[in-house]
Image (tube, helix red, strand yellow):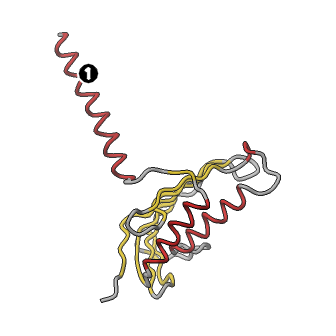
Amino acid sequence: MKNKTQILGITALLLVCSGFFVYRERIKTSLFPVTPKLLTENKNKWDGQNLDGYEYDLQIRGKLRKDYHVVVENREVVAVTEQGQAVDVRHDVSIPGLFASIEYDVKTSKAKGRSKNRMAKLSVAFSNRWGYPELYLRRASAPFKSGYVTWRIENFEPKLAE
């Protein structure tokens, strides 16, 4: 009976550890606090790719749960779909638009007169290969809308010139 309990315990531990490694592999990179230097380095890396077209899946989580497929051609968003249906989004969901969104959050979270405990906490993971923000997390408290917003880019496919 004691051996059976030990085997079950070891099996449970192995399952938990393997789940952790699968989760970590899914993220692929670590989240870092957003700093102007980190943002500039990766924005320059992205700009240096000189991609006119690409597509990806954008998952947005927070108060709203959205799953978009974004297509960019000639540096313009030409299609945004959700479950195969075209949708009209209010924000620029191109990679430069997502960089602009992070820059806006950095600027407003550090606005003059805000105490440290009233700022949004911003974290990001960038694609090692392309430099775009793969995963972004904004945790906020008053006077921001409380809660969190996170978005993730998956299935990024560049349209390389032939």
How many numbered callouts? 1
Q: Residue at x 48, y 51 (%)?
A: 31
Q: Say which of 37 and 50 sits in front.
A: 37
Q: Secondary structure at mark 1?
A: helix
Foreground residue among 129 and 86? 129
| Residue at image location 44% in from the left, 64% down from the top | 153
The vertical placement of 85 against 141, above or below, is below
Residue 84 quadrant: bottom left
Residue 86 in the image: state x and y as whole percent.
48, 78
Q: Say what amino acid the circle numbered 1 marks.
A: Gly
Q: Which residue is mark 1?
A: 9
Circle 1 Cα neighbour tier, 10 Å, few/some/many (<14 / 14–19 / ≥20): few
User: Where in the figure is residue 105, as x and y percent of width and height?
Assistant: 66, 60
**x, y percentage for residue 57?**
42, 67
Q: Residue at x 61, y 61 (%)?
A: 36
Answer above or below: position of 160 versus 28: below
Residue sitting nearer the eye, 71 or 119: 119
Residue 42, placed above or below residue 74: above
> 74 left or right of 102?
left
Judging depth in this view, the residue of 89 and 104 nearest the camera is 104
In the visual, does 105 lie left or right of 50? right
In-image side of 146 versus 5 (left or right): right
Q: Where the C terminus falls, by quadrant?
A: bottom left
**Residue at image coords 82%, 52%:** 113
Eyeballing the image, is 72 above or below 150? below
